[in-house]
Amino acid sequence: MFDAAIALRHRLHQRPCLSGAEAATADQIGAFLLPLRPDQLITGLGGHGLAAVFAGAAPGPCILLRCELDALPIQELGGQGHCSQIAGVGHQCGHDGHMAILAAVAQSLARQRPRNGRVVLLFQPAEETGDGAAAVVADPRFAPLQPDYCFALHNVPGYPLGQLLLRDGPFSCASRGMAINLHGTTAHAAQPESGLSPASAMCRIIAELGDLPAAVRGEDSILFATVVGAKLGEKAFGTAPGQASVWATLRSQSDAGMQRLLTHAEALVRDAADQFGLRAEIAYQDVFPATANSDQAMAILRRAAGSQAVLELPQPFRWSEDFGHFTARFPGAMFGIGAGEHSPDLHNPDYDFPDQLIPIASSLFLQIVSQALDTPP
């Protein structure tokens, strides 16, 4: 029953596409969905996204299930027969498996349409960069698809295969990359006093960024800043550099905590630049909101889980997910599902999504749909 979905995953795994460049992946998904005759098949949504709509005969809620199209800039090291054929690009986050799960759901809905309401299967672009969900929501063609409930999953290595990882409220953290550029004046290394070096300001920022969370934590148990890189000048022994850069990732379990952290981090940069007479520029990329689960959606998810093994998570995951753009607007829930206790970690070069998870997760999604269609918004 799941052979076609598994074969699709293997083809997707062999031809991975990076964020924002998922045209070939979208073509494969479209070719799989078209023979299933969804009531609507929308392409080019928020970039290369697709939405397949399966409608029931009677009115009812609109339920959105979401997966991701994009892969990672990672060279795969696995030896399986369906290994990536694209140099330097691989599905080391398991999005190929997530797509195959929704493809299997589509097959089931094609055989038996929902009794009421609508089910929207969203194949979203550009999750890894944090751009895709916001682009989909902003696309005018998404407006008629706005859901009463939305759900998404992520496979999580290190947990028993198929175990559900649930959490009320915050599920995954907000994060963003902070790029700091300090501008002084370059000088000859024999006369450094004639220039304006950013070295001291750079060192202060690196040293103090990590201490900021203690001052601004508030109610967030997870809130921190990680310096991921820095650069001062070049390997040129005759030059005292006038430029420096610091890169850091800011992370918080809530959007409010992120805003506090941003305010203090920017104040630190401005103060350090002023102290040494420099000009500072700050830019952001890979911006992810926090993903927070609603009470309504979690109640649906728990009913759908039935007797399936469940682990209640004591804290949100520290990683980020742009599904938060959906849960900020619509009642929704994201959950983890175990990919096996001995599976390599996500983003590891030898990670490969377990095919055995496709029937487990697709069956759960169908139960979620059934429960949600019986739950008035």
Image (cartoon, helix red, strand yellow):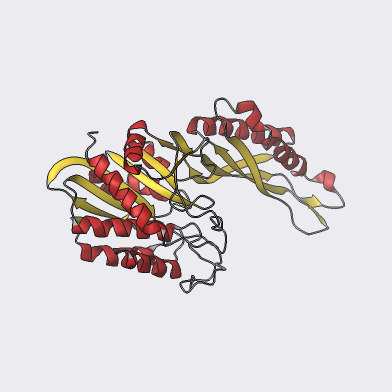
Number of marks in the image?
0
For residue 2, say whether it is visible. Answer: yes
Q: Is residue 124 visible?
A: no
Does 316 appear above or below 43? above
Instruction: Left or right? Give the position of 23 relative to 86.
Output: left
Residue at the (68%, 37%) spot, across then down: 210
Q: Position of residue 16 (x, y in %)?
A: 45, 66
Quadrant (top left/top right/bottom left/bottom right) for the C terminus: top left
Considering depth in this image, is 158 or 222 the residue closer to the camera?
Answer: 158
Residue furthest to the right in view is 190
Q: Position of residue 174 (x, y in %)?
A: 50, 39
Judge whether 113 appears above or below 4 on screen.
above
Q: Is residue 5 above or below residue 242?
A: below
Dividing the picture into quadrants, the one containing residue 331 is top left
**Outermost residue toward the top?**
218
Question: In the figure, residue 50 lies in which quadrant?
Answer: bottom left
Residue drawn at x 14%, y 41% as measured from the top left: 59
Question: In this image, 230 relative to 4: left or right?
Answer: right
Residue beneath the point at 23% across and 42% down: 62
Q: Using the image, determine if residue 231 lies above or below residue 89.
A: above
Q: Is residue 209 left or right of residue 322?
A: right
Q: Nearer the viewer, residue 10 or 74?
A: 10
Quadrant for the N terminus, please: bottom left
Residue lying at the far front of the rendered structure: 307
Q: Position of residue 68 (x, y in %)?
A: 40, 54
Q: Quadrant of residue 197?
A: top right
